[in-house]
Image (cartoon, rainbow, N blue to C red):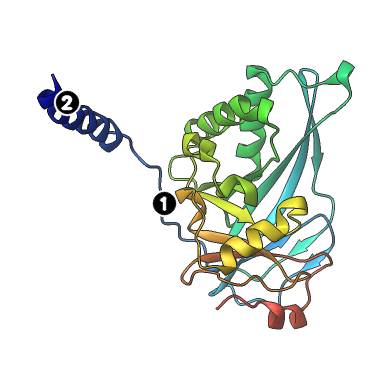
Amino acid sequence: MVYFRPIILFVLLSLVAACYSDQVVREPRPADAPATMLWAWERNEDLRFIDPATTGVAFLAMTLTLEADSVRREPRRQPLSVPDGTHLTAVIRIETVKQTERRPALSDGQIAEIVELARSALERPNTRGIQIDFDAALSARPFYRKLMKELRSGLPAGTPLTMTALASWCVGDSWLQEMDVDEAVPMAFVMGADAERIRSFLRAGNDWTEPLCRASYGLSIDEAPLAGLKPGRRVYYFSDDSWNAGDLKKLYYP
């Protein structure tokens, strides 16, 4: 039996390798969005100073709060002005009620309502894609996966579908591989307790371990520049205040 062990081991390793080779790694899909995108949150944003040939806008279109079995919609109320022809992505922020008695059901009915609301967000001229911003708890991940699957099939064919991702999701957490999205944007700012660990990880020349996170960065002009960024990626910039022309000098990505 001793002489057969190497053969048995070889066969077992071959079977394992074959299993892994059959697994499809979900990669980000090419998108026609500009390389520079500005997040425009719920405030008066006059962005007519940007060049639409190089810069797009991901604007907060609505905030949806999941409560019990309902979806409470808070539409954007602040004006947004952009040059003609600006590439727009409608961002839908999803939040959940924390009180136990009103904890969200995370139901199929809520998913169907979110899909319809996302379709309505595309009605603004030049709005070409949907981005979901949902800091989903571990228990909400199955709901989030199903939501993105239903959005993919419920939106007009070819509509870019992206999501924001906590930076920690992009380092050593493989759950995003189950998300049918074109791009997961790592929010490399306001990282809380993970900030120094992730900054050190990137500064050492490492890349996000999650492939879907390797097409873009989410950065803030109000934080110290992040070292170790890889070239050739789309960048979404966030500002704590309304954007002005001078802020464009703070866009530091190479």
Q: Where is residue 22? Give x, y as percent.
A: 27, 33
Question: Compared with residue 233, is residue 176 higher up or lower down, i.e. above or below?
Answer: above
Q: Identify the secondary structure beneath mark 2.
A: helix
Residue at 61%, 77% (x, y): give it: 51
Estimate how packed mark 1 is, as few (under 14), some (14 to 19) or many (20 or more) residues with alpha carbons within 10 Å: some
Q: Is 23 left, or right, of 125 in this rendering?
A: left
Tell me the SS state at disc 1: loop
Horizontal relation, residue 154 to residue 63: left or right: left
157 is higher (above) or lower (below) than 197: above
Q: Which amino acid, by three-letter code, is at mark 2?
A: Arg
Q: Which residue is mark 2?
A: 5
Q: Residue at x 30, y 35 (%)?
A: 20
Q: Left or right of 67: which side holds 56? A: left
State the residue at coordinates (59%, 69%): 203
Q: Extreme front residue here?
A: 2
Q: Residue at x 40, y 43 (%)?
A: 26
**Residue 99 at x, y = what percent?**
89, 24
Label 1 sits on what residue type? Arg
Residue 1 at what x, y percent from top left?
Answer: 13, 18
